[in-house]
Image (cartoon, rainbow, N blue to C red):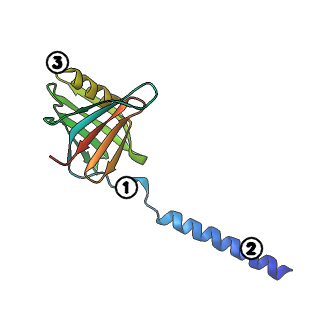
Amino acid sequence: MKTKFLVALLAVATTFAACKKDNNDSQKPEDTKLPQGTYRLIESVQYDKAGKDSASVKFPMSTLNLSFDQDKKTASVSGEPELIKITGSYNVKINSTLADADIRTTKVAGTENDKIVVGLLEKGDTFEAKGQTVIVKAKDKGHLVFSTQK
């Protein structure tokens, strides 16, 4: 009876040790690589009250760029969606979270589309990188699509 108990105890201990080793080998949030390069704004998408896509605007002439700094764990934006000059930055936290948004604009009156972009940037709380695209999401408001493609 003691032998069966010891074998069972040893099996459980081995299982926990293996799980702990797996967890130690996984990437730590601070080791996560941020997207590299510069991404240009190509589209804004607004959500309706139900949280569904309701209005989409393409930006073929946008010069608004998004880039990430791996060392400082920041993301920065600069340029013009249409008429208004925008500059700003975010601190990048674990799980692709954006925090401490600091978005500034010129005093020039922009278009309605410029105002939508500024609003989504100010509310931006997460990002998702897929291939040559980065999507900045503004919870329950919409998202901005940035791409490396011209």
Q: Is residue 107 above or below residue 30?
A: above
Mark 2 vs mark 3: in front: 3
Q: Residue at x 28, y 42 (%)?
A: 75
Residue drawn at 58 percent across, 66 percent down: 19
Q: Quadrant of the N terminus?
A: bottom right
Q: Earlier in the sequence, mark 2 or mark 3?
A: 2
State the separation of the CA atoms marked 2 and 3. Answer: 70 Å
Q: Amino acid at mark 3?
A: Lys
Q: Position of residue 27 (x, y in %)?
A: 43, 60
Residue 98's x, y, as percent?
Answer: 36, 39
Element under disc 3 = loop
Q: Residue at x 23, y 45 (%)?
A: 147
From mark 1 to mark 3, how far is it between C-alphas? 37 Å
Q: Residue at x 61, y 70 (%)?
A: 17
The three-letter code of the residue at mark 1 reads: Thr
Residue type (three-letter) at the residue carrying disc 2 = Leu
The residue pinned by badge 2 equals 9
Residue labelled with disc 1: 32
Left or right, 142 with respect to 88, comes to right
Residue furthest out toward the right:
1
Q: Residue furthest front?
A: 54
Q: Residues within 10 Å of mark 1 (few under 14, many from 20)?
A: few
- Of residue 5 and residue 111, the one placed in the foreground of this image is 111
144 horizontally vs 78: left or right: right
Viewer-proximal residue among 4 and 145: 145
Tell me which label, 1 or 2, sits earlier in the chain: 2
Few, some or many residues within 10 Å of mark 2 (<14, 14–19, 20+) = few
**Labelled pair 1, 3 in contact (Cβ < 8 Å):** no
- Res. 28 image quadrant: bottom left
Residue to which mark 3 is pinned: 107
Q: Judging from the image, what secondary structure is the residue with disc 1 in?
A: loop
* Residues at discs 1 and 2 in contact (Cβ within 8 Å): no
